[in-house]
Image (cartoon, grey):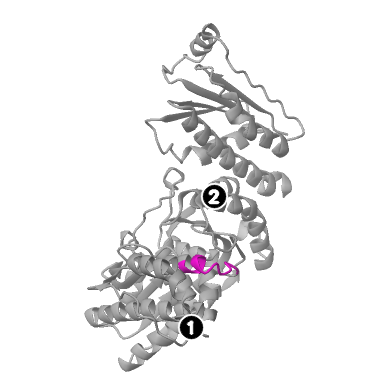
Amino acid sequence: MYIIEAKIRDKTQIGLNHLFTGRVCEFWYLFPKTLIINQQPIASHRLYNNCVQEGMDGVASSWDFQCNLEVDLGSEENAHIVYTALAVDKELQPDKVKRHMSVSNGKLSVNFEAVEARFLRASFSAFVDVLTLATKTIEEFGPKKE
Amino acid sequence: MKDKKLIALGFEGSANKIGVGVVAIDGSILSNPRHTYITPPGQGFLPRETAQHHHQYILPLVKSALDTAGVSPDEIDCLCYTKGPGMGAPLQVSAVVVRVLSQMWKKPIIGVNHCVAHIEMGRAVTGAVDPVVLYVSGGNTQVIAYSEGRYRIFGETIDIAVGNCLDRFARVLTLSNDPSPGYNIEQLAKKGDKFIELPYVVKGMDVSFSGILSYIEATTEEKLKSNECTPADLCFSLQETLFAMLVEITERAMAHCDKKDVLIVGGVGCNERLQQMMQIMCSERDGKLFATDDRYCVDNGAMIAYTGLLEYANGASTPMEESTFTQRFRTDEVLATWREKESVIA
């Protein structure tokens, strides 16, 4: 039931994409039914700059490595439950990784920014693990089962 | 006014065990399933892999805990989880599930201190009223007694925990980690009779184990090669040395606090040799030893549920924004409000 969209921006063009390949494969296993994955490595600076401008509304950012993740949780209520549960845990290294989350139309959008690719990967990877756990908990014990 | 007993669902996942328990306020345990992450011989458990294990087992355990207890989510009064101390990633697993369930089931959350939970479970199971507590596990070694609203730490390890010392020696001998490395050391030690002298490190009411571990790690291979002793002799000698240190600091704390009884809790607490040595000391001081078996000694969900329920019954709860986890959470940070009321009655 969940649609996942992950967009990765790679300013330095060092092939950040492949860092995420393992994670993206895991998405396929977890949500095989209606999965849409949209990976967009940004190859040129011009495109990257466009992206940054798109993402500029509200948040000024200068960190090189970014990743957006969008998860459709089926309902506004579910999206809020997941948002509230995951917002409690702050990033462990706020000077190296920033995470911004928002909810709209039953979708949870998460934006990661990091100063180095490895911090982005670690943070993204850990987040996907707990996100998966939270959605599985809803599937298992949510109202539809009762 | 409801005449129904308060019931809690508790989640424990601070180390290599994930457990979910259902407990009522009178201390009756309705269900307490758990699953242990067992690594191959010679290897310890690491945070990331341990968290993966917990991810895999936690939801089936919740289901099994509710089914065995015959309790529906509606009948539960609060959700309790281990706030700390422990390894970060594994702690997060319980915290995240509890936060989601709390919103779906509209139940309050109680964050529980792992060490305090061991103490309260031990007291509930054994009926010990006001003992000196020896809390010995893979991650903690503390001598604790209740005084003026808190469980105070009178002595503790200044480096690694006693269980960590035993587990890591088990890795040197590549003993099995199933059911636990400590259990296999205990069994092997029964066959040992030659005592090998090891460093003995007690500093006041504190102990230190890392030097002993380094010493035995460095000398084991040579001693075994030269047939000076057997692996069983080394297990025997290590246990005798470590446990003698623990008995010594426990006795010092008893004299200091003027208390007669001892309660042993934590994973190492189910070691029968430790219980035997402590029993000798207690009987010489006209005190009683209280100990439990592996069902309650070893980390479990029921101990978290029971301690959380005590706090809940005294009006405490953890708001969602504060339902964090922390690797460091000292035993004496918790105000043991339920104990204050007990002492007024007594």
Could you tell me which chain the residue with mark 1 belongs to? B
Q: Residue sitting at 68 percent across and 34 percent down?
A: A25
Callout 2 secondary element: helix
Q: Most prominent secondary structure in the magenta stretch? A: loop
Q: Quadrant of residue B63?
A: bottom right
Q: Position of residue B225 (x, y in %)?
A: 49, 74
Callout 1 secondary element: helix
**Residue B34 on the magenta segment:** no
Q: Report whether residue A76 is seen.
A: yes
Could you tell me which chain the residue with mark 2 belongs to? B
Q: Position of residue A107 (x, y in %)?
A: 61, 28
Query: What's the amino acid at mark 2?
Result: Val
Q: Which residue is mark 1?
A: B272
Q: Quadrant of residue B332?
A: bottom left
Query: What's the amino acid at mark 1?
Result: Glu
- Residue B237 vs residue A120: left or right? left
Q: Position of residue A17 (x, y in %)?
A: 59, 24
Examine the rendered structure and indicate whether residue B311 appears above or below residue B270. Answer: above
Q: Residue sitting at 40 percent across and 66 percent down?
A: B218
Crowding near the residue tagged with mark 2, few <14, some 14–19, many ≥20 C-alpha atoms within 10 Å = many
Magenta residues span B169-178
- Residue B194 vs residue A41: left or right? left
- Residue B60 vs residue B118: left or right? right
Q: Quadrant of the C terminus of chain B?
A: bottom left
Q: Which mark is residue B93?
A: 2
Q: Residue furthest front?
A: B226
Q: As rendered, which of A62 and A69 lies closer to the eye?
A: A62
Could you confirm whether marks 2 and 1 are on the same chain?
A: yes
Q: Quadrant of residue B72?
A: bottom right
